Image: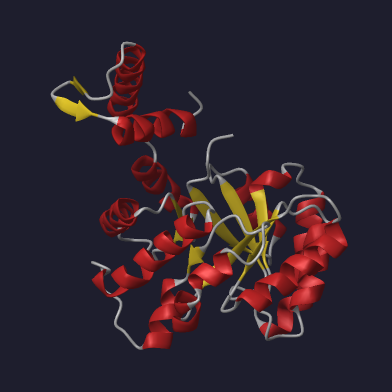
Amino acid sequence: MNPARSYLFVPARDLSIIKKAFSSIADVVILDLEDAVAISEKQTARKIMKEALETHQDENRVMVRINSLDTDLWEADLEGAIRSGAGGIMVPKAESEQDMQKVCHRIREIAGDKIVDVIPLIESARGIQFAYEIASADPLISALAFGSIDFSLDIECELTPEGLELLYARSQLVIASKAAGIGSPIDAVYPDLTDEAGLEKQTVFAKQLGFKAKLVIHPKQLGVVHQVLSPSEEELALAGEIVKAFEQAEKAGEASIKVGGQFVDYPVYKKAKRILQNRGY
């Protein structure tokens, strides 16, 4: 299975909308019990989430965003999600190693030996400050995700289309993830559904920083995100050429060659090989 590029949020409020999300091209669907659900509707949303999971068999493609640990809702959310077959859990407002360990411990109590991916959603200055500790808190944690809107409220910055005000936070998540040995982080949502050019620009920027996936709030955004975060046919062809040429040169005792005018050494070769492996070659 190729690495996920898109994580589509869908409110756990309406089964018909959830079914449309399941039939979309999203790599992963996140059933949302948190921000997209009013307080008065939390119990109903949990029932809808269970029904959706129990009727959808591809558990590796479905996660649940539970309510935050500072509420009295998260444990029932977690238990309902795991017992109904969710393949992963997104934990909002992640701020400490201890909280993540608490969640992962409870998952093991419910799921036993079943592997459940855990993605902490980093949405505050404290979360950024302790990103490495959060990322390395437990082996169930597979990646970090960035919640830029709540983060901007927390640090009182102004969000811009360019996103330079989030550069430090994004870079911290990339570095913390790599240092902890987990997957590349997942970039924040782009809230303007009418601005396809802005979505593309911000996705390109995140990719340049080291993000390999993006949170999405509507299926219409998926095409742009997938296009940006997938290697082009030209990139795949060049990667294949680099790998083939370098491996032949290595057998002859060479570790620095030219391919199409580009110098190729071990780092360039490893990057090309990773591109091919990520796309199933």
100 and 86: which one is in front?
Answer: 100
Q: Where is the N terminus found, in terms of image quarters?
A: top right
Quarter of the image holding residue 276?
top left
| Residue at (31% x, 15% y) in the render | 253
Horizontal placement of 106 versus 88: left or right? right
Q: Is residue 79 above or below residue 22?
A: below
20 and 32: which one is in front?
Answer: 32
Horizontal placement of 123 versus 243: left or right? right
Could you tell me residue 238's position as x and y percent? 28, 24
Q: Is residue 104 above or below residue 264?
A: below
Horizontal placement of 231 versus 14: left or right? left
Q: Is residue 220 above or below residue 258?
A: below
| Residue at (76% x, 80% y) in the render | 73
146 and 219: which one is in front?
Answer: 146
Could you tell me residue 211's position as x and y percent? 40, 54
| Residue at (43% x, 49% y) in the render | 212
Residue 185 visible to an observer of this rendering: no
Quarter of the image holding residue 234?
top left
Quarter of the image holding residue 45?
bottom right
Could you tell me residue 178's position as x and y percent? 46, 55
The residue positioned farthest toward the left in the image shown: 261
Residue 101 visible to an observer of this rendering: yes
Could you tell me residue 146's position as x and y percent? 46, 67
